[in-house]
Image (cartoon, rainbow, N blue to C red):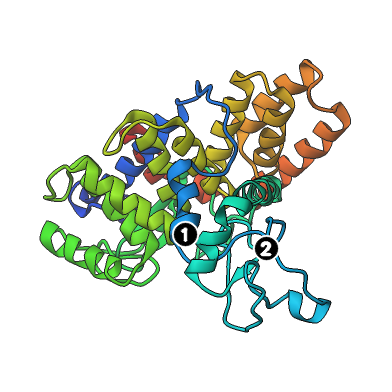
Amino acid sequence: MTDSATTLSASLNALNVDGNNTAFVTCKSVCDKSDDALNTTKDTVFSSDDEEEDDNKEEYNGADAGGVGVKKLNSTDAGCACAECGKVGDDHKLCSSCKSVKYCSRQCQLKSWPSHKEECKKRTAKLQEDALFKPPPPQPDCPICMLPLPIDISQCQYQVCCSSYLCTGCIQAHWMVQNELDCPFCREVATHDDREYIKRLEKRAAVNDAEAIQFLAGLYDGGQKGLKQDHVKAAQLWMKAGKLGSRLANRNIAACYHDGRGVKRNEAKEKHHHELAAIAGYMNSRHVLGEMEWNKRNFQRACRHYAIGARAGHSGCLSDLQDGVKIGAFDRDEYKRVLQDYKNAFEESRSEGRENSPLKQLMSLLG
């Protein structure tokens, strides 16, 4: 027992030079800053801003079937015909926003855009509203214990070597029986050299590993591991990682738009990226969206966000949903069902190793 405790103590001390925890705290800190950004009052829909609207006009990929000037076609040809000229073909491209009409060429798209624009916006808003409030994907599992990763980010750690998120319970259990600080999943020995650490990370980022890019952005944002602090580059990397599917990256770029860090402050874009993160299952973003709606006195809409978050096991969403029940914005019977789902989600991801992990406590203190 003494040897195990000594090994764990040495492992925790080694965190100061390993870097996994250092950069992890940076990402956590960014999230915490954005969690406080709850006073947005701009009334926007999930659809993006004017710049993103114009993308439909500039890129050849189509528009909406309800637009004026669409030729009448028989039912056989309608599904593969150009919405502007009526030309039938199998290689036409869909509108990237409304996904409802096709065009045979960029010229046809540009010609149809003035008549298609309004219908496209309506259709896009409906599609994204449906996506925003549909049940989120389940939490990914820890690849070692195969339990869902906890929503509490202090109970997870990103491993640069294999681009995996592991729960702190599994990390602690592994380090208790090891004499060196290696990855509990892929067993690669951690490096104490900053250049080698960055080299490993950049190697994964070069092949469009979304989480590696997201993590690298956190190092640039905090000026860690020998990198010069660069908020602009950090924002660019987070944007790229978000497009590749990193929900945490979308969460962090939302924080950048709130703070004006590396980008100009923009409330609409802040909300847009929170929504992207929430759709992907990031419940801290879901909580922020609920607070945004609550502050605008859209209580029922806020409670819809809180209910989704609470069902996934987010304690903050559950607490705020109780306020919605008190003012009559949410049904009491439905709240009982949400509460049961919350308990189930909490128990599914709970383990004694996670709850009592000294690594979790250390991360909480440093964060």
Q: Callout 2: few (<14), some (14-19), or many (20+) C-alpha neighbours within 10 Å?
A: some
Q: Callout 1: few (<14), some (14-19), or many (20+) C-alpha neighbours within 10 Å?
A: some
Q: Looking at the picture, does residue 160 appear above or below residue 266?
A: below
Q: Quadrant of the C terminus?
A: top left
Q: Which residue is mark 2?
A: 100
- Disc 1 marks a residue whose amino acid type is Gly
Tell which of 60 and 305 is nearer to you: 60
Q: Looking at the picture, does residue 128 appear above or below residue 325?
A: below
- Disc 2 marks a residue whose amino acid type is Ser
The image quarter in which residue 304 lies: top right
Say which element carries label 2: loop
Tell which of 33 and 190 is nearer to you: 33
Apparent side of residue 213 relative to residue 45 in the rendered image (left or right): left
Please report the residue visible at 28 percent of the width from the left and 34 percent of the height from the top. Answer: 261
Q: Which residue is mark 1?
A: 245
Q: Earlier in the sequence, mark 2 or mark 1?
A: 2
Q: Looking at the picture, does residue 92 appear above or below residue 321?
A: below
Across and down, in percent, residue 120 comes to: 63, 52
Tell which of 107 and 65 is nearer to you: 107
Q: Is residue 20 visible?
A: no
Say which element carries label 1: loop
Please report the residue visible at 69 percent of the width from the left and 56 percent of the height from the top. Answer: 68
Tell which of 336 and 62 is nearer to you: 62
In whole angstroms, how far apart are the C-alphas of marks 2 and 1?
23 Å
The image quarter in which residue 175 lies: bottom left
Q: Is residue 202 visible?
A: yes
Please report the residue visible at 53 percent of the width from the left and 39 percent of the height from the top. Answer: 285
Identify the disc placed on residue 113: none
Please report the residue visible at 81 percent of the width from the left and 77 percent of the height from the top. Answer: 74
Q: Nearer the viewer, mark 2 or mark 1?
A: 2
